[in-house]
Image (spheres, helix red, strand yellow):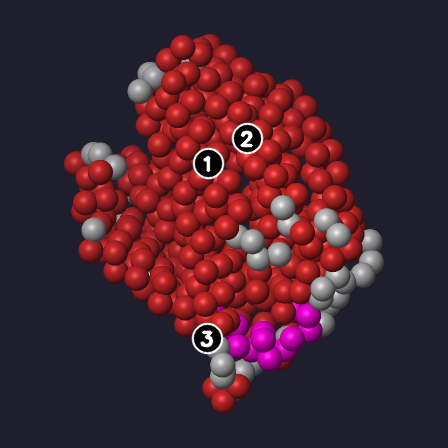
Amino acid sequence: MRSLLEGNINKQLISLALPLILGNILQQFYNTVDSFIAGQWISQNAFNAIGTAGSMMNLFIFMINGCCNGITIIFSQYYGERNELGIKKEMFISLVFGLCFVFLLSFIGLLNLNTFLKLMSTPKCIFLLVKKYLTIIILFLFITFIYNWSSSVLRSFGDSKMALYVLGLSVFINIILDIVFVVLFHQGVQALAYATIISQLISSLCSTYYLIKRYPFVCFKLSQITNIKPLLKTTINYGLISALHQSSLYLGKLFIQGAINSAGMNIVTAYAVTTRIEGLINSFGDSGCAAISILVGQNYGAHNIKRTKETLFKGLKLMISLSIILSIIIILLTKPMTLLFVEKSQYQVIHETFIYMFVVCIFYVFCFIGNVFVGFYRGIGRVDIPFKGTTMHVTLRVILSYLLIHHLGLVGVALGCGVGWIFVNLYQVYQYRRLDIFNK
């Protein structure tokens, strides 16, 4: 077993986070491939359909990722505790629970697909294309779950590099299949959906095979799966709350998009550009959060409270430093990056993009502090705190965005975001001070 219970915490956090950062960036590239090929080799309607489908597809994926994040906590703690029987039980329970959860999602998604698309105001010219694409994706969500589940187990053991290799393999296969199905055989948007599913299936089989060979103690016999009621309850609790945490964050973004859409096309275009830029900086924050969660989880599982606290405080120092460096870089590069997406003549869009990024970068240190605490609370199993914090942040951010956007433009949205982060930081520190075990 790889140990994260001793050694240099800073080096271990960086070692865990780097593959996750690359994976997050790669994941963004993954989502761009289908849209690019659809636009170049199928039609403009196909390009628009993939983009529209992405909004709803991401909601399901966020929920699956959230569920897997919750399950990861249990694996990390058992791994740190060296509890092989607990790992065997959780392998069985998490797989069965996860598949049941995903089958329920698929059932709800397919049953209400037309309603969801109408609520999204999907244009009639692409309605059928979006429905065809999403039907395939939703029908095979169980493959998406297995793909994410196997990668999450590897990460919980500290094997984030292999999780990155699995993602890289999936992206590579997806690109090859996109080219074969669409460019060579001239298939439609359904082929892009099948390419995604097949690539995830192959990658999940490879990662599961590696997991069994590299960590044989994960293999279980049904005779070993006894007295599982408490662990089943914990798995459901962690999985569902983490799924709700991720979905509430995404739903908040959809509500904010509604405020953006009411402010004119220049604001809409500028916000679309800022979203792409923020995706880059958020890759670092999300990866740091995941790395801290793994390290905290293993040490908390091993009942090493001192090292658990050290991970929190050293994680804070690293992430605060990183946020300051990244904020300066992003401010300097915002205009050149904006010109990758819009023409030089779109002065208003360029101005709105720059002023938004300038203001939001001032607050990004609070975002990264929040990521550290989310990782910490996940690691100790208090998934309720990040969920409540995110819900409060999203609610405040949405309200302020609607109140300020027509007076301040995108600056109002940036201020709403920053105020939300500060409020959540205060809530997270307050909750930390209430944890008696860390105040002894």
- How far apart marks 3 and 1 lie (CA) works out to 32 Å
Residue 434 higher or lower than 194, as above or below: above
Gap in angstroms between the C-alphas marked 2 and 3: 37 Å
Q: CA distance from mark 2 to mark 1?
A: 8 Å
Q: Residues within 10 Å of mark 1 (few under 14, many from 20)?
A: some
**Coordinates of residue 230 in the picture (x, y in percent):** 49, 72
- Identify the secondary structure beneath mark 2: helix
Q: Amino acid at mark 2?
A: Phe
Looking at the image, which residue is at 22% across and 49% down?
Answer: 113
Precedes in sequence: disc 2 or disc 3: 3
Q: Earlier in the sequence, mark 2 or mark 1?
A: 1
Helix, strand or loop at label 3? It is: helix
Q: Type of residue at label 3? A: Lys
Res. 229 mark: 3
Q: Which mark is residue 18?
A: none
- Looking at the image, do the residues carrying marks 2 and 3 touch, with CB atoms under 8 Å apart? no
| Vertical arrangement, residue 181 with respect to residue 84, above or below | above
Task: Give yes or no for contact between labels 3 and 1 (Cβ–Cβ under 8 Å).
Answer: no
Name the residue beneath numbered marker 2. 423
Q: Which residue is at a point 71% across and 29% down the rendered structure image?
A: 325
Task: State the extent of the magenta-drawn residues as a range.
Answer: 79-94
